[in-house]
Image (tube, coloured by chain):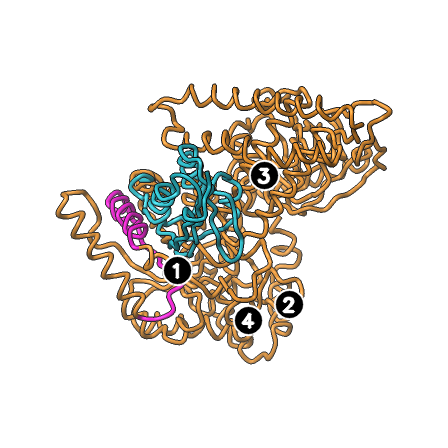
Chain colours: A cyan, B orange
Amino acid sequence: MITETDLIERTVVIGNELGLHARVATAMVQTMRQHACRVTLVRNGMEVDARSVLGLLLLAATPGSELIIRANGPGSHEAVQQICELLEGDDSDHRR
Amino acid sequence: MIQTIGDKNRSTHGASPMMIPENTMIKGVGVSVGIGIGQVVLLERLSTDICPCRILTTAEVPAEIARFEEAVDSAEKRLNAIKGQIDGNHPLGDHSYILDTHILLLRDKMLYEGTKRAIEQGKQNAEWAISEVMTKITSAFDSIDDEYLKERARDVHFVGERVLRILLGVSSERKMHQLPPNSILVAHDLSPADAAQLKKEHVLAIATDVGGRTSHTAIMSRSLKIPAVTGLEKISPMVQTGDTIIVDGSTGLVILNPDAEMIFRYRQRSDVLRNYHQSLLAFGRLPAVTRDGGRKIQILANIELVDEIEIAVAHGCEGIGLFRTEYLFLGREDLPSEEEQFEAYRAVVDRNKPYPVTIRTLDIGGDKIASSLKMPSETNPAMGLRAIRLCLNLKSVFKTQLRAILRAAHYGNCRMLIPMISCITEIHSTKKILEEVKSELASEGVEHCDSIKLGILVEVPSAVAIADLLAREVDFLSIGTNDLIQYALAIDRLNEHVNYLYDTLHPAVLRLIRQVVNAGQAFGVSVAMCGEMAGDPVNVPILVGLGLDELSMNALSIPLVKKLIRSISYDDCLDLTHQAFQMQSAQEIHELIEKWIFDRFPGDFFLSQQ
């Protein structure tokens, strides 16, 4: 059941050198499969579903941009935590 | 070929078979010189132009949705199968995640639910529905301000077309390796994978609807020396496989349905051009010394791809004056590794021994992002975080590149060129990082060059103003005219309303160049020029007169520029330069030089450049 008390909002700055790119977006959608909660990302007034690769890419979240993560529903704390890690993390080791 | 299905309930959109009048000319962008006369091989293209469009009855909707879902299922199976073939040793290796992205895109609600909604509510057939949804999504990507993200529209296309092909019942792989001889390849666009499979022996020319001078098609065709015209907009729906066409990569013209006389004329033109180039090539092997022996200029080539070295060498370059490294970084998701960069730089350094190779460090940002879109009013990327500014900001990326360059420099004559320097601090910061990298390499015991020559690209007017201060800090100066002229004259070359003001012979431009040359001479530092200005014969006598030491240009211009320099005398050039500095406008300077060249060499040097 989705309840009011589960509503979370957190601001995060993109740490990845390439921004919210396909690799991060793909990982995020895959992460969201483990959760039943509703999560959206907001940038410059545009709000998209964290389950949509296209939505995430169209946010055009370049390095250093600020995003708001909104979540409500079961498991939303954990989901937000995982998403923050994906966005803040510098995955340059992964790319080298 | 995709045929629209001749059902009376279906209406087609565009692409009705049409008669093309004889000698129909279409103008595009000539991106690779030469003339091709041959038979069209049309590469299949799928778009809303040629897919069947039909309004469904309410009763048909559920079956159409099921048909769409099945097509997506089948596309997903195929992608999973491809992904299954990739193991750790596959060349795609670490990039295989892109297949995961594509698999997710298939079910992305914008595409999947969006298409189903269009079928259900818009009563559109599946092909029409998905095409329209794809167009909407890709146009949303068009307005993005970031080159990497913008490129993702291609992924949407890749995935959408796969589904579309299944719906239409056509094969999803292009047969690039089975082209008949004398083919002229016509396509909406060529992917890098398509281009990589091209056989030069079979393809006389290429013509595409989209793409500009820096598109993959352009770069690949130049390095393969296949004449090509891009940006023709509507050529692919206008021709069919087997049609005879003429592609003129020098003028950007394509002629459909040519008559015998036209073909004859182009055959002649093609022979003339070939002979002209052949005779010019001989000059490529000679040094660029003025007729009176008064001055020797070193002529180098600008390259972008490792594969371009052979052409540059064949045209007589005496080293590489500008190796742009962006190509290694663009059009991909990840960053090139140190090893990958090292291999690329080393290959170029090795091939040019004993001549120098000037590697420009990463120059991303600015026009490369801004060129293709309207800039939002609050940002101005041409004056933003780009080139060295970006590198100093992304220190780890910069250091990786410096490591690769220093390692490659161990194997030959290599110099490093820093773009967009606008103040002395940037040089100091760069040197500090360079020293850090050297000592890291030394402590790791990695072979590298400890004394690499460092130069800056003088392309910001402030760098010209302090050229005397900068010259003390570096081993050479290289004038990047493309940007310098834009910044100095406050003209965006891509802005059609003002680009008529862009002129390499503007008195201000000549004075800026003189100031840089003077600073270089005062401090014993060589001065090069690597913009397009250096390769245009009209500018050459003045550049010689101004005292530039090196000119670096498109490889194809080298033989002609050498021929010109060998035909003129240094004293004459000094005299011409002196006269030009008395003139008040670019127009007067143009007239002066054109007359000067024409008086000496009537009929030569200006018909060329083709």
Q: Is residue B251 left or right of residue B478?
A: right
Tell me the mark number nearer the camera, choosing from 1 and 3.
3
Question: Of the residues under marks 2 and 4, which one precedes in the sequence?
Answer: 4
Height in image: B67 above or below B607?
A: above
Secondary structure under tag 2 reads: loop
**Along the horizontal axis of the image, is B446 left or right of A1?**
left
Residue identifier under label 2:
B498
Number of other residues with Cα within 10 Å of mark 4, as a class: few under 14, some 14 to 19, many 20 or more: few
The amino acid pointed to by label 2 is: Val
Badge 2 crowding class, 10 Å Cα cut-off, few under 14, some 14 to 19, many 20 or more, is few
Between the residue at mark 3 and the residue at mark 4, the CA separation in whole angstroms equals: 42 Å
Residue B383 coordinates in the image, percent (x, y): 47, 66
Q: Secondary structure at mark 4?
A: loop
Residue tagged 3: B110
Q: Nearer the viewer, mark 3 or mark 4?
A: 3
Pointer 1 or 2: first along the chain: 1
A80 within the magenta span: no
Distance (Cα) linking label 1 and label 3: 41 Å
Which residues lie in the magenta part? B395-424
- Could you tell which of marks 3 and 4 lies nearer the N-terminus? 3
Q: In the rendered image, which residue does mark 1 sit on?
A: B419
Task: Name the residue rendered at 14%, 44% in the picture.
Answer: B444
Residue B496 relative to residue B339: left or right: right
